[in-house]
Amino acid sequence: RMIDLVVVTKLDRIARNVRDYIDISAEFNEHRVALVCLDLDIDTSTPDGQMIMRNHANLAQWQAERIAQYSLETAKRHVEQGRPLGSPPLGYRATKDESGKSLYVIDPLYRKHVELMDKLYLRQQSVNQVVDELHKRGFKSPLGNTYSKPQVSRILQNIRYTGRQEYEGKVHDGNWPSLR
């Protein structure tokens, strides 16, 4: 009985789904602790407040699930249309075509970095030696840092440089030019 009331600014600050909210609410009720949600102007010290809070928790979870479903459907549709997912890899810039759809275009400066990485790796067969050579030549990433071994390794293995992308275990053609 040290706490009588818990105040939250938004419902999602205390629970991310209905199950969590029900568990928290049950514990609060057991200890006679009221929950006040400021953005909804709800106080669970009353039966009406408890019912309204449960309904809001249900709606919030439904909304989160719908957003997740929509995001997956959108990603699938973009892949089927050859549109890129996520941020562009080094050597490309994100842009929009005349219809407003996203695509990658080649970034001339960083294209040279990728091409040099490929050439060096094919010749030396060593990521460490590629990184060392990039450091010797003063090549910097877009953030101004020297290239790291994990970064170069990811670049060398990235399928997007072939003008394709992988999604759900399948390889799809993209709408951007190949660097490899």
Image (cartoon, helix red, strand yellow):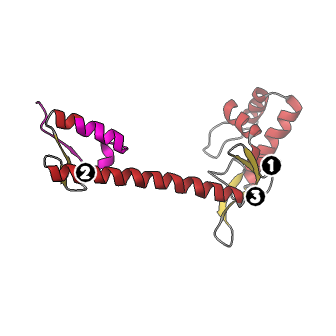
> What residue lies at 37% left-to-right and 44% top-to-bottom?
17
Q: Are marks 1 and 3 in contact (CB under 8 Å)?
A: no
Element type where label 2 sits in the image: helix
User: Which is more foreground, mark 2 or mark 3?
Assistant: 2
Q: Judge by depth and name the residue closer to the eye, 120 or 46.
A: 46
Label 3: which residue? Answer: 176
Q: Is residue 37 visible in this depiction of the protein?
A: no
**Gap in Å between the C-alphas at discs 1 and 3?**
9 Å
> What residue lies at 48% left-to-right and 55% top-to-bottom?
67
Amino acid found under the numbered disc labelled 1: Thr
Q: Position of residue 18 (x, y in %)?
A: 35, 44
1, above or below 18, in the image? above
Amino acid found under the numbered disc labelled 2: Met
Q: Position of residue 168 (x, y in %)?
A: 68, 45
User: Which is more foreground, mark 1 or mark 2?
Assistant: 2
Q: Which mark is residue 53?
A: 2
Q: Which range of residues does the magenta coloring cover?
A: 1-26
Label 1: which residue? Answer: 162
Image quadrant assignment for residue 154: top right
| Crowd rating for badge 3 (residues with CA inside 10 Å; few <14, some 14–19, many 20+) | many
